[in-house]
Image (cartoon, helix red, strand yellow):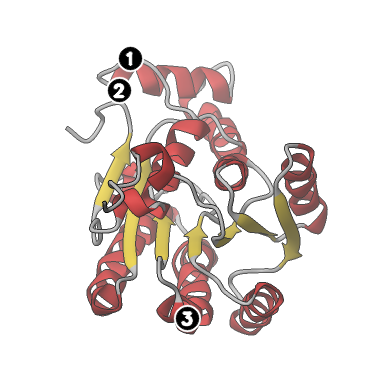
């Protein structure tokens, strides 16, 4: 008698998988790292700041998971290459790559208000950072039996955000990168997808909200955030970092083996 198919709960587990999550010292990246570890993956927590990365690792270890902190600036190709190689070599494999590192940009309106430095920084981290990580991880993923890349884009990569052009453009470019890589890597059974979070109160939004509050003459960045949710989210509620982490975990699992090249929103209906 042949065994029946594995249950969905079993297919969602990530036991034996090795993951790398960028920008995992806080916000979305932290939630993703914690969730992947809880499902059994061994996780490299990569962040610009060693202390932030270590805090996330400590949380994972407290939950009984396995993780290691890596400090690295994703905008720099050589340090990324070294960090990915060190993690892959230490584990003997690398299966799951999640590009969550990102930065907001200064307001535009008009877009000519954005400096060359604004554009360079957004593209260097939000786009080229993912390029650097994917380049460094490519050979590892080709050897994996369950290779996955998940790029964290944004709803502003799908619908324009005229108030911060460099950010919006960089996130749209990340979606395009995801599709290009999905096409190239599909014959090797490596799935590549983009996830587009909506309105989530993270350190990035807190920083952006304070800048927007000045221009909108609002009481606080949080007040700006809440008003944006009321105006733009059909479900009339913000999303959470855990909402995004759950989708990423699914895309990393065996249950998503035939999902690639897709752009998935976690936005309460903003992009309907």
Q: Answer few, some or many: residues within 10 Å of disc 1's Cα (few below 14, many 20 plus, some between 14 and 19).
A: some
Q: Which mark is residue 236?
A: 1
Relative image position of residue 2 (x, y in whole percent): 27, 53
Q: Nearer the viewer, mark 3 or mark 1?
A: 3
Sooner in the amino-acid sequence: mark 2 or mark 3: 3
Q: Is residue 224 above or below residue 94?
A: above
Residue lying farthest to the front in this orientation: 1
Q: Earlier in the sequence, mark 3 or mark 1?
A: 3
- Discs 2/3, front: 3
Q: CB of mark 3 within 8 Å of CB of mark 1?
A: no
Q: Which mark is residue 135?
A: 3
- Res. 228 image quadrant: top left
In this view, the residue in front, 257 or 148, is 257
Relative to the observer, which residue lies in front, 59 or 217?
Answer: 59
Q: Which mark is residue 126?
A: none
Using the rendered view, name the quadrant where residue 272 is placed: top left
Q: Judging from the image, what secondary structure is the residue with disc 1 in?
A: loop
Query: Is 27 situated above or below 117?
Result: above
* Residue under pointer 2: 233
The residue lying at 57 percent from left, 74 percent from top is: 93
Q: CA distance from mark 3 to mark 1?
A: 39 Å
Residue under the point 80% across and 51% down? 54
In the displayed structure image, the side of residue 158 where residue 174 appears, left or right: right
Q: Position of residue 134 (x, y in %)?
A: 46, 74
In x, y percent, where is residue 44? 66, 61
Crowding at label 3, few (<14), some or many (≥20) Cα neighbours within 10 Å? Answer: some
């Amino acid at each position: 008698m042949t065994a029946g198919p594995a249950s969905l709960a079993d297919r969602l587990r990530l036991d034996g998988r090795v993951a790398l999550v960028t920008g995992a010292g806080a916000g979305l990246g932290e939630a993703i790292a914690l969730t992947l570890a809880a499902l059994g993956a061994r996780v490299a927590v990569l962040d610009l700041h060693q202390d932030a990365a270590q805090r996330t690792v400590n949380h994972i270890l407290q939950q009984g998971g396995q993780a290691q902190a890596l400090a690295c600036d994703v905008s720099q190709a050589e340090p990324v290459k070294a960090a990915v190689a060190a993690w892959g070599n230490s584990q003997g494999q690398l299966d799951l790559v999640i590009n969550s590192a990102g930065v907001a940009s200064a307001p535009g309106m008009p877009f000519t208000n954005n400096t060359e430095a604004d554009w360079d920084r957004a593209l260097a981290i939000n786009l080229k950072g993912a390029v650097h990580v994917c380049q460094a991880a490519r050979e590892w993923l080709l050897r994996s039996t369950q290779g996955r890349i998940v790029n964290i884009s944004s709803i502003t990569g799908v619908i324009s955000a005229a108030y911060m052009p460099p950010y919006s453009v960089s996130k749209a470019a990340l979606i395009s990168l995801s599709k290009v890589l999905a096409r190239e890597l599909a014959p090797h059974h490596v799935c590549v997808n983009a996830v587009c979070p909506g309105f989530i109160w993270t350190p990035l939004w807190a920083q952006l909200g304070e800048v927007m509050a000045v221009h909108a003459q609002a009481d606080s960045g949080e007040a700006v955030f809440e008003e944006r949710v009321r105006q733009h989210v059909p479900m009339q509620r913000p999303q959470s970092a855990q909402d995004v982490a759950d989708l990423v975990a699914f895309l990393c699992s065996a249950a998503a083996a035939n999902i690639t090249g897709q752009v998935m929103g976690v936005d309460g209906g903003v992009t309907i």
